[in-house]
Image (cartoon, rainbow, N blue to C red):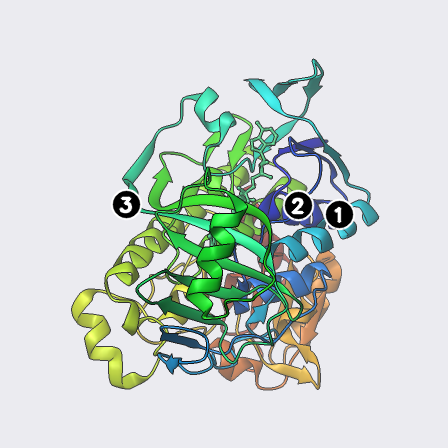
Amino acid sequence: MEVVIVGGGTVGLCTAVFLARQGVSVRVLERRPTVSDHPRAFGLNPRSAEIARQAGMTFEDDNLMRGVATGPSLAELTPLTGRIELPEIGPARLGHCPQDRLDRSALALARELGARVDFGKEVVGVSDTVLTTADGETVEADYVIAADGARSRVRELLGIGTTGPGVLGNHMLNVLFRAPMPAPKYSMSVLRNENASGILMNVDAGDRWIFHVPGGDPAQSAEEFQRLIRAATGLPDLDVEVINMLPWASTAWVAEKFRHGNVFLIGDAAHVVPPTGGFGLNSGVADGHNLAWKLAAGGDALLDTYDMERRPVAQFTMEQSLIRGEHRELHWDLSPARAADRAAVGMANALVVIAGYRYDSPAVIGAEPVPSLEDLTLDGTPGSRMPHLWVTPGTSTLDLVDGFTLLTGTKADGWLAAAAEVGIPAHAVDSWADAAGIDENGAVLVRPDGFVGWRTAGEGSALDLRQAHNHLLCR
Ligand SMILES: Cc1cc2nc3c(=O)[nH]c(=O)nc-3n(C[C@H](O)[C@H](O)[C@H](O)COP(=O)(O)OP(=O)(O)OC[C@H]3O[C@@H](n4cnc5c(N)ncnc54)[C@H](O)[C@@H]3O)c2cc1C
């Protein structure tokens, strides 16, 4: 089986890693000459970080989540938020890694795992799973994944519409530059004075910075941006080297379908959300992770569940991002004290958006809806991300997942024998019964993406397990 991914941005490259890791032959076609050097997202939320961990993707975490401040210059800043801390919900914490660095790490790993990544290949035609590139190549695949970003040519050529408000205004210009400024006290500084205004972010621990200019015009000269940055920072002699610019606008829509025949939309090609919350890249990575194991397992009915599971999550994430755009102050303050304020505007706690969503499709047995928008509930309910427990120091229950995996209570020898007979890896885990809502002789069948597919409180047979496994594979 050959899978071709159109677009070697972060989501396309990460998905190439997920597929290649499962032995799927994959080729990425990317129109740029190399990976983008423009960092956009900085934060990998804990769910994305644990997906990266499962896939063996390593990235240097700069530990730069130092909060937000505002003022008329860098010398006169008043803090708006403190350091952003999230409670431990899994084996990986919130990670700070500029998107361009993540791309380089995903590219290297994808190639190491055998994926073919071709740069300078722009896809200009799509007919089912036959693609044509600008340089005249015809590429045939069994499945095509469109990871070609918000202006997806593939989506457009397939005539797939979108729903949602669209462009919300707020045109911004991101200016990427080098300057020898000292390491910042804050990860984001909102600078405003009579000569200039914008948002300054340190890209990494080195000398790369981003200045977000509201309404900025990319046609302006590098000298004008130098003047603007010097005026905003209050450093008139600052040595500024403009690297490049990226115009963007806050936008919200979700594609009307994520599957068209054997073509699947993922990442920004499938949904675009406004920036507050930092959900865009993160939900794209989760798309690829959801789709990859289904492609590896095979089966048309199973592949249908990609749209059934991810599109409602995208819709929910878009709505939550829109609410955050109106009530930014309620977003990162996760304290119970703000719960009533969040409820009043329909805002879910950020952790629920990040990891608390549920899947309800034929690839889950006994799914239940999200019980609370405020409390993250990862209690073993089918359709939810499996509970995280440290099994030994440094090894989480999530680290035990190797394809479909059975996790049992401590008195479940029958299930362990059944799993051996069916050929599914199985582990008895202390405290799992309590965490997952089963008895000590019960079991939970976890899907390859770490979501609970089926749980059973008590004993059962190899036949029960085989039936559940086949059900989750939609066979
Ligand atoms: C300023 C800014 C800040 C952001 N901050 C955050 C954040 O903090 N957290 C977060 O989660 N998200 C954030 N996002 C959103 C995040 O950057 C996107 O969601 C993410 O880049 C989507 O990745 P993608 O791979 O789907 O699309 P893209 O990154 O757009 O990649 C698409 C790729 O497809 C290629 N391509 C396009 N057309 C073709 C074609 N016809 N043939 C071949 N290749 C093609 C493009 O060259 C590109 O490399 C931010 C976005 C912006 C603009």
| Callouts 2 and 3 close, C-beta under 8 Å | no
Q: Is residue 208 above or below residue 305?
A: below
- Asked whether mark 3 lies closer than 8 Å to ligand 1, one says no
| Residue 230 position within the rendered picture, expressed as x and y whole percent measured from the top left | 48, 63
| Callouts 1 and 2 close, C-beta under 8 Å | yes
- Asked whether mark 2 lies closer than 8 Å to ligand 1, one says yes
Query: Does the image show residue 85?
Result: yes
* Numbered badge on residue 155: none
Residue that carries the numbered disc 3 in the rendered image:
168
Residue that carries the numbered disc 2 in the rendered image:
13
Give the residue displayed 56% in from the left and 38% down from the top. Answer: 147
Which of 475 and 84 lies nearest the eye of the viewer?
84
Residue neighbourhood size for the residue with mark 3, other residues' Cα within 10 Å, grouped as few (<14), some (14–19), many (≥20): few
Asked if residue 251 lies left or right of residue 56, the reply is: left
Give the residue displayed 46% in from the left and 40% down from the top. Answer: 218
**First in residue order: circle 1 vs circle 3:** 1
